[in-house]
Image: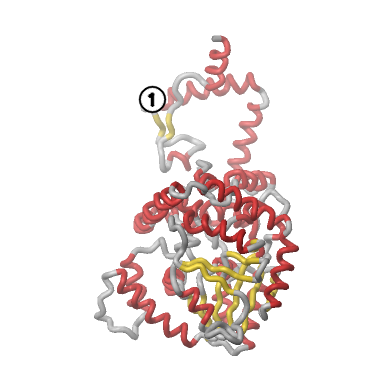
Amino acid sequence: MTAHSTTKQFKSNATRAIADTQLTGNLKAVRQNFIDKRAKAAHELPEFEALRENAKEIKNHTLAHLDLYLEKYEAKVTETGGHVHFARDAEEARKIALEICRKVGAKTVTKGKSMITEEVGLNAYLEANGVTPVETDLGEYIIQLRGEAPSHIIAPAVHLNKAQIESDFRRVHTHLDPARDLTEKTALLTEARAVLREQFLIADVGITGANFLIAETGTSIIVTNEGNGDLTQILPKVHIVMASIEKMVPTLEDVSQILRLLARSATGQEMSVYTTLSTGPKRSGDVDGPEEYHVIILDNGRSAMLGGEFQDMLRCIRCAACMNHCPVYHQIGGHAYGWIYPGPMGSVLTPSLIGVDEAGHLPNASTFCGRCESVCPMKIPLPKMMRHWREREFERNLNPAVARYGLGFWAFFARRPKLYSLATRLAMKMMKLASRGKGSFRSLPGVGAWTKHRDLAVPEGETFQAKWKNARRG
C-alpha cells in the first residue's frame, strides 16, 4: 500500500480548488516566481538545448542498462562500507527503514525533503511504530504541522501564504512567547530554524531522498537550497537514503551535465545553494558523518514501465518545470490531483504507479498546449504519454459513458464522409439559429462542463471541409 490516493475524486477536488479564492491567489506565486526565471536562466546558457539532448541520451542509456548499473552501484556502496537494500514495493521499503531505526533504538528521525518517502507513506508508518519523524525542509515542516501532503514537488507549501504559516506556528509552537512578532518572513524562518535545531541534535537517524545515485562511485546526491539536508545526513548516527530505481546515473561526469539543467529548470538558478554528495559512512579520519550508511532502492511499479510506452517518464529529474508552466496546475494547485505527484508529470507517472483505474482522470487534466514538453529539461513527451493513458482508459471503458457514446456517435459519421459533411453543415446552421445572434453560448446541451466556466463560440462561415473543397476548386 502506498500513500492514500483521492485521484478518483479529481473532478470534485478541482471544483473545490477553483472555488477557493485564497488558494488561487496563493498560486499566483508559481507563475511569478518560476516561469520568467527559468526562461532567463536558459537564455543565458548558450548550450542549454545541447545539454537537454545530452541529458536525454544519458538517461536513455542508463534505463537501457539499468540492471547493470544497479549492480555496479550496490557493489560500490558495499565497498565503501555502506549497505544497499532493494524494495519491490512501498511496504517493503517502509519495513526496511523501520528495521534500521529499531536496530539503533531510534526514537526521533530527522528527514530531508523526499518525494519517495511521501510516496510510500513513511511518516505515518514510523509514527504508528513509535518513531517520530521530523521534516526539516521548511516547506515540508510547514505542511507536516498542517497534516497535509506537498502541493508541489520542489515547493511543498506553495499553496499557503505568510498569514497561514504564522497561524500554524502560533498554534503549534506554544512553548514560545505568544506576544512574539512574526510579521516578517525572516522571523518565521528564524523560529523554524531554532525549533528544528533541537531536533537535529537529538535525532538518532537521518533520512533523505536522492536526486541522483552514481553507479561509478556508489554516491548519493541531494540538491537543496537549505542546509537541513546536510544536517540530516551528518549529525545522526545513521543515514538512510531512500530513492527509486530511475535515479541512477552512470558517472559523476554524466551527472554534472544534468545538474546544469536541474536548478535552471526548477528555480532559475545556475546551481542550487547546496549540492551534497554522500559516499558511505564516516571513515576513520573524518571529523563528522554517520556511523552507518544505508540506501533503500525502491521499484514500486517502475520496472514495469521499462521497455514500454511510458519508459520516457523515468527520465524525470523532478525539477517541476512542467507544473510551473501548466495552466491547469495554475488554477487548481497540487492537492487536487489527489496523490503525491501533481501536474503533467503526475498525470503520466501516477497512473503508471497506482493504475489507470485509480488515476484515470489525471491524463484528462490537460489542455495539450505542449508547454510542459517544451520546458522539460529531459525532453519527456508528456502530452503523447497522456494521450496513451487516455487510450488505455477508453479501451477499458473507464471514461464516462457519455464520452464513450459521444465518440461512438462521432465515429459513425466520421466513417461516412458524405454523411459527416452534411451533418456538420446542418449542425452549424442549427447552432447559429439557436444562438439568436449572440455570437456565443453560455449553455448548450452536451457541453455543460465547458460552458459552465467559459463561453462556447458560435461557428462562423463554412465548415473546414467546405472551405478545403472550395480552395481545391480555386
Rendered residue at 57%/44% (across/down): 383
Taking depth in this image into account, of 172 and 320 the one nearest to the observer is: 320
Which secondary structure lies at badge 1? loop
Position of residue 29 measured from the top left corner of the image (x, y, whole percent)? 37, 56
Q: Amino acid at mark 1?
A: Arg
**Quarter of the image where the C terminus is located:** top right
**Quarter of the image where the N terminus is located:** bottom right
Residue 355 position (above or below residue 455): below
Position of residue 147 measured from the top left corner of the image (x, y, whole percent)? 46, 72
Rendered residue at 62%/40% (across/down): 404
User: Can residue 130 be spotted in the picture?
Assistant: no
Residue at mark 1: 436
Rendered residue at 54%/79% (across/down): 206
User: Can residue 128 be spotted in the picture?
Assistant: yes
Taking depth in this image into account, of 439 and 306 the one nearest to the observer is: 306
Within 10 Å of disc 1 (Cα), the crowding (few <14, some 14-19, many 20+) is few
Q: Residue furthest front?
A: 285
**Is 180 on the left-hand or right-hand side of 81?**
left
Position of residue 22 measured from the top left corner of the image (x, y, whole percent)? 35, 58
Residue 148 position (above or below residue 56): below
Position of residue 199 measured from the top left corner of the image (x, y, whole percent)? 45, 83
The image quarter containing residue 98 is: bottom right
Rendered residue at 62%/87% (across/down): 102
Taking depth in this image into account, of 154 and 391 the one nearest to the observer is: 154
Q: Residue furthest top?
A: 474
